[in-house]
Amino acid sequence: MSQNNNEEHNYQGSNGNHNGRAKRRFNTLVVDGTRYRTLLTEKYKKRMKYEPGNWGKIQSEFPGTVVSVDVSEGDYIKKGDRLYIYDAMKMKNRAYSPVEGQVKEVRIKENDIIRKGQFLFLID
Amino acid sequence: MSLKKKILELQKKREQVLKGGGDKAIQKQVAMGKMTARERIVTLLDENSFHEYDLFVEHEARDFDMDKKVLHGDGVIIGTGTIYGAPVCVFAQDFTVAGGSLGLMHARKIGKIMDHAMKMRVPLIGINDSGGARIQEGVNSLAGYGEIFYRNTLASGVIPQISVILGPCAGGAVYSPALTDFVFVVDKISKMFITGPGVIKTVLGEEISMEELGGAKVHSEQTGNAHFYAESEMECFNQIKKLISYIPWNNSQKANKIEPKEPLTDEYPITEIVPGNAKEPYDIRDVIKAVSDGSEFFEIQQRWAQNVVIGFGRVNGETVGFVGNQPLILAGVLDVDSSDKAARFIRYCNAFNIPLVTFVDLPGYLPGIDQEHAGVIRHGAKVLYAYSEATVPKITFILRKAYGGGYIAMNSRHLNADFVFAWPSAEIAVMGPEGAANIIFKKEIQNAEDPEKMRKQKVKEYKEKFANPYVAAAKGYVDSVIEPQETRKILVHSLEVSQNKVDNRPSKKHGIPPF
């Protein structure tokens, strides 16, 4: 981390001093097979790795508080069965299963505060 | 009562109101490391140039015991003044009066000075330091915000609008700055967000400080909401003054011309800045400084989407807008953020009659799943839209790589650039030699005894054939191939001959840019 900060410090302070080029530690960026020597931004380094979709992995769509959990581990459920109710933005919201299968994992309980994108159920 | 007595009475009334929220509130403001609203205005404007209006305005709220409260000036100061002799309209929210909260009269005062700025066709500067809507006034304060947003929108592209965030600016209040042209922030003082840390904690259980959520650094480095970042209020005011010196008063004028200066060629020797190898980095700002008057470059959004560089400079005394790919950062690619950054600046320059000078050196758009899913198609299209739409003089210099969609987007001839020049180091092609050779000569490489050797040979062949400016020059896509040291001379000439440029477009209500 500190190395990156140093790089950026040099860059910010370079102020047109192209002789200072040797001091910087460059990274490599590949575009269409060509390797470019350049600096990377913090935002670029923090990019999220893409994960292919898994319909059985139920994640929260909205942050909120769990009001009730309506399925238990081992239950067989149909598509459209209610999974849980959560309180968010002053509303009670119901979440339904997008798939049919057996509930393998339940990762929440009543009164839990959930983040957006949190892994809640695994259905197989 | 004699006139003398009446004058004394006025002086006494003024004295009371000028204190804003009173000594205690002022002490609090100072303790937070902030200047008072009136100090800010006086510091920003030319000495003795400020004239205040609506000093005696008072609110009319009755509910929640508000009728018993006196809020001097209803928490905002409005008036007119000058910056380097240029007239400006200004408002500053006074945090010492009810936390600078926005009630109906407060908003009406702001609306009044906005209307005035529009009528007089002069820049508007708004200093924001407010706790938000005055809850006791209910929907009236929301009405106030709405009236301000509406005026911001009507004024957009007619007069320059500058927002200075010198305190909290939360909830609906953030949308007035967001609608204006330039947002200034100061470290540890500016705070902008839609929902504050309190709400986030209640709803999400996540704890975050105001500074981390919406401080000056966040908005100048991550979100791109801010255009100028300063360490102190004083530095911020100097930045505003400098900006005012570069831009015209309104969209029917040109920026003031000043005495031309030569660039500092010893410090910025143009022939030595750019490495011949297109894979090697350098700082594009050095090239800009090598051609701008006095090697001065006033960079905008210096800390955000740094892979493209934008800002003002002067050439032969005239303000120009520079746009350049930055090979130092992410090889100068266009991505979601840098496209937004460049496109908005191009539209600003076009609205205010500022010629555009573009330096091209990019491998194209940034490849990647995250970029595709973040909508690089929609965002990237903004650059094409903005350049195509612009009718100010548009001059392009292709320094090295100009590949694929990136070449087209960066003010190419095909988007109606007025002049396109290329250095002999320019490589105008559909993609870089490595990628292109791998596709064109796929079979030859696969079937070769030594594929790696064949690949290298084919890359070399492709480089010789296409990685140069002459293929494009042969079609007239490049007007001339120039030596780097001729750049400034040719730029000066191009601007001179573009002075009376007329570029009439079909009339329409407005276009539909890919927002």
Image (tube, coloured by chain):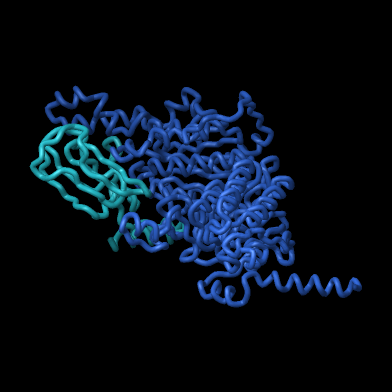
Q: Is B504 situated above or below B15?
A: above
Query: Picture coordinates of residue A116 (x, y %)?
Result: 29, 48
Q: Residue at (46%, 24%) from the top-left corner?
A: B474
Tell me: residue B267, above or below residue B20.
Answer: above
Q: Hey, which quadrant is residue B491 in on the image?
A: top right
Residue under the point 33% across and 48% down: A88
Q: Which chain is blue?
A: B
Q: Which quadrant: the N terminus of chain B?
A: bottom right
Across and down, in percent, residue B196 comes to 42, 58
* Quadrant in the picture for residue B156: top right
Position of A98 with respect to B396 (left or right) is left
Q: Residue furthest left?
A: A74
Q: Residue at x 39, y 33 (%)?
A: B377
- Residue B412 vs residue A7: left or right? right
Position of B344 with respect to B57 (left or right) is left
Q: Is residue B119 left or right of residue B478?
A: right
Q: Nearer the viewer, residue B140 or B513?
A: B140
In the image, is residue A100 above or below residue A1?
above
Q: Position of residue B446 (x, y in %)?
A: 16, 26
Considering every residue shown, the one lying at the far right of the view is B2
Residue A97 image position (x, y, % from top left): 21, 36
**Residue placed most toward the observer, B443 or B32:** B32
Is residue B297 visible in the rendered structure shown here? no
The total number of labels drawn is 0
Q: Which one of the lettered chains is coloured cyan?
A: A
- Which residue is nearer to you in this view: B458 or B358? B358
Is residue B482 depicted above or below B7 in this figure? above
- Residue B160 shows up from this direction: yes
